[in-house]
Structures are given as structure tokens and as C-alpha cells.
């Protein structure tokens, strides 16, 4: 064979190999196999406080579609205790200094940010930049601007973002929302939602404004969610609001122990919300043209119950089923490439309302959302 033919043959061989490789890479079978390479996602919890310790970690022992693969903590003693309890390998244990190296760990698919609200913005963005899907506890962030930047970071990195609103995954909540959305009791006329408990701590992040404290960010988000889900629509304005405290030595520098507000929805529908660290309140009442839906308690970890003219709504379960259901649902969405049930945009909506409530309380005026 002459040199020309040899070169032509070599070029054709390389070309055919390249085309064959491309065909393999682009074939539907390989693409499907790549998407389905994991049947369970590895989750790393960032922040090992009460919620991670008492609820999320136990729930991850029950989940079918994800598992506890790693932790991020600034406390070496916690790292050691969790390592032993959950058999977590050393390579999956991180602190806040080496967190970004999580990008090199294929065991970790999802980073669940369970930190004080002031830290959500930073760690959601860092997790997304590390190439991980992100779940973030509520409240999503301190400002709507931070929420949007978190959404943008996940979108830029082609990673999903879900907010830890467990109740939207909860069957009793889903059932009363179905009744509302299908207008089985006619139109909604007004809603009333309250969420609160006596908070005895005095030096938690909930009493620290710089860390995202104040009742509206914590329990108040539940009341806002209840009003929105109960009305079946989005508020257009805050008609009025007020904040107060009976313990100014604890809730100081403008920090709210109790907040009340009236939300304005389209069509003249109103929603009254109350949230407090000073009293035990937990209900959602939805007044419709054909009767009322009453949810009490409205947002416990177990035992959500509702009554209506259509009958009782009561799907019983045990703690921490809500958290397990939430994480399993979100894992399925990631693995199947489906939209998240509670995406970042949902958290952004609530923080816009939080900002409007504080503005209305400050000015005494109606504030558009």
C-alpha cells in the first residue's frame, strides 16, 4: 500500500472510531443508562443541629430513594459521633473550610443546607458551584435578592434546588389543597392561619437578628404558606401588619416575638396570619361558600388533621415520615429529571411576602407584593 492510501486509511479509521464513539455517547440506551446509574442518591447534611440530628438523619434511615452519605460540621466531636453512629467514611466528612472539595466526591449527589438562615445563601451557592443538587431548609434566605441569586446559581450549574417545605409533600395538606383548587366547596372567601409555640431559649439564632432570627422568618413562614395554600392563590399586597414582643430583653433591636398581618388576595379574599414565639397557636381555617375547612393542628410533624363538609381528612403516620417523604419525593424528581415539587421559586415567594410584612409594620401602610 502506498503512503497516500495508508494516510487515507488511517484517517478513515480515526473518523469511523470517532463517529462510533459519538454514536455510543448519544445513543438513547447509553443516555438512559447514564441517567439511571444510581437508584439511591447520597445526601450530605450541612449543619448538625436539632433538625438534622433528631429528624433528618433518622428519616434518612427510612428513605428508599436516598441515604445519609456525608456530613458537614464545624464541631469535631459531632463529626466523630456521627461517624460512629451512621458508619460514615472519613472521606465523606467535611468542615466549613474544606467544604468546596465536596465537588470531587461522587458519593455525594445532594447537599442539604440545614444552617441558620443567614448562611443559606452562601452554602447553597457553594454547593451548586461544587456541582451538587441542593435542598435548603426554610426560610430560604434573608432577602428576596439572596433567594434569586441562589436560584440563579443552581440554574447556571444545571442543578436542582428544593426548599424544605415538608407540608407540601404531606397527604392531608395535599388533600385539602385539592378540595380548594378544584373548588369542591366553592370559592374561598377568607383564610386564617396561625403558627407559633412558646420559645424558651434566649441565645439561639432565632433570637439573633444577624443570623436570621425573628418569628416571621421561622414560624411565620408556616403561617404565610398556610394562607397561600388555603387561598389557592398568591397575595397581591399586605394590607396591614404589626410586630410586638412581651420580652424586649430577649427580642430586641427590632426583632419580632409576635407578628400579625392581613394579606390581600385577588377578588377581595383576605388572609389573616399570626405567628409567635410567645404562645402555642397552630391552625388553619379556610372559609368557602359551601362551608369551612378546619385544619388543626396545621403543621405538626405528625397528626395533621382537617375537617370539612366533605368529611374528615386524616392520613395517620409517625415521625419522621414527613421528612422521609419529602426527601424521597425530591430524590425521585432528580433521578427522573422532573420538576421539583417545591422549587427555589417557592421560597422566593415567601421571602417577598416577609419583606412586605415588615415594611407594612414599619410604615403602617398597605404594601404591594
Image (cartoon, grey):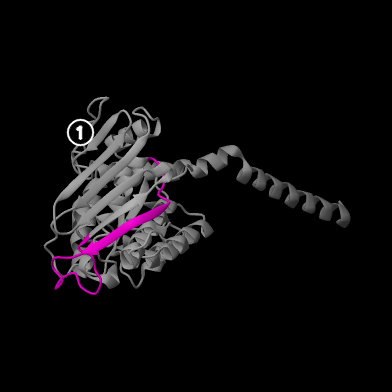
The answer to whether any part of residue 300 appears in the image is no
**Label 1: which secondary element:** loop
Judged by its main secondary structure, the magenta piece is loop
Eyeballing the image, is 245 above or below 323?
below
Depth check: give the residue in front, 254 or 219: 254
Residue furthest left in the image: 200
Residue furthest top in the image: 310
Residue that mark 1 sits on = 316
Depth check: give the residue in front, 58 or 108: 58
Q: Quadrant of residue 27?
A: top right
Magenta segment range?
Answer: 232-258
The answer to whether any part of residue 287 appears in the image is yes
Q: What residue lies at 23% left-to-right and 45% top-to-bottom?
A: 299
The location of residue 38, given as percent across then percent down, is 42, 44
The location of residue 230, given as percent across then percent down, is 33, 41
Instruction: Give left or right: position of 307 versus 134.
Output: left
Query: Residue 240 colored magenta?
Result: yes
Eyeballing the image, is 118 above or below 300?
below
Instruction: Give left or right: position of 339 versus 190.
Output: right
Depth check: give the residue in front, 175 or 156: 175
Eyeballing the image, is 192 above or below 135?
above
Depth check: give the residue in front, 243 or 48: 243
The location of residue 102, given as percent across then percent down, is 39, 63
Dot 1: few (<14), some (14–19), or many (≥20) neighbours within 10 Å?
Answer: few
Quadrant showing the C terminus: bottom left
The location of residue 314, given as percent across then percent down, is 22, 31
Eyeballing the image, is 367 above or below 16?
below
Query: Residue 316 colored magenta?
Result: no
Amino acid at each position: 500500500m502506498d503512503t497516500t492510501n495508508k494516510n487515507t486509511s488511517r484517517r478513515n479509521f480515526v473518523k469511523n472510531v470517532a463517529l462510533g464513539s459519538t454514536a455510543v455517547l448519544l445513543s438513547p440506551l447509553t443516555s438512559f443508562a447514564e441517567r439511571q446509574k444510581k437508584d439511591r442518591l447520597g445526601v450530605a447534611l450541612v449543619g448538625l443541629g436539632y433538625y438534622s440530628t433528631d429528624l433528618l438523619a433518622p428519616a434518612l434511615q427510612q428513605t428508599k430513594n436516598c441515604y445519609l452519605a456525608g456530613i458537614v460540621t464545624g464541631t469535631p466531636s459531632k463529626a466523630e459521633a456521627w461517624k460512629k453512629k451512621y458508619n460514615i467514611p472519613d472521606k465523606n466528612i467535611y468542615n466549613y473550610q474544606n467544604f468546596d472539595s465536596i465537588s470531587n466526591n461522587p458519593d455525594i449527589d445532594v447537599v442539604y443546607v440545614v444552617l441558620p438562615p443567614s448562611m443559606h445563601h452562601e452554602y447553597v451557592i457553594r454547593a451548586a458551584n461544587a456541582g451538587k443538587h441542593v435542598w435548603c431548609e426554610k426560610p430560604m434566605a434573608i432577602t428576596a435578592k439572596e433567594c434569586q441569586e441562589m436560584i440563579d446559581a443552581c440554574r447556571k450549574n444545571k442543578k436542582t434546588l428544593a426548599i424544605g417545605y415538608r407540608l407540601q409533600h404531606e397527604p392531608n395538606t395535599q388533600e385539602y389543597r385539592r378540595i380548594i383548587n378544584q373548588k369542591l366547596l366553592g370559592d374561598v372567601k377568607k383564610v386564617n392561619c396561625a403558627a407559633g409555640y412558646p420559645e424558651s431559649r434566649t441565645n439561639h439564632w432565632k433570637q439573633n437578628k444577624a443570623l436570621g432570627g425573628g418569628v416571621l422568618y421561622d414560624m411565620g413562614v408556616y403561617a404565610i404558606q398556610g394562607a397561600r395554600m388555603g387561598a389557592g392563590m398568591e397575595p397581591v399586597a399586605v394590607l396591614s401588619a404589626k410586630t410586638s414582643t412581651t420580652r424586649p430583653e430577649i427580642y430586641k433591636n427590632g426583632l419580632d416575638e409576635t407578628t400579625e398581618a392581613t394579606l390581600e388576595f385577588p377578588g377581595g379574599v383576605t388572609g389573616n396570619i399570626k405567628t409567635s414565639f410567645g404562645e402555642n397557636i397552630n391552625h388553619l381555617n379556610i372559609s368557602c361558600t359551601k362551608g369551612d375547612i378546619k385544619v388543626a393542628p396545621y403543621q405538626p410533624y405528625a397528626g395533621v388533621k382537617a375537617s370539612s363538609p366533605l368529611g374528615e381528612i386524616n392520613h395517620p403516620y409517625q415521625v419522621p415520615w414527613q421528612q422521609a417523604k419529602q426527601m424521597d419525593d425530591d430524590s425521585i424528581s432528580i433521578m427522573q429529571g422532573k420538576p421539583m415539587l417545591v422549587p427555589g421559586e417557592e421560597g422566593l415567594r415567601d421571602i417577598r411576602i416577609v419583606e412586605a410584612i415588615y415594611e407594612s409594620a414599619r410604615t403602617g401602610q398597605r404594601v404591594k407584593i
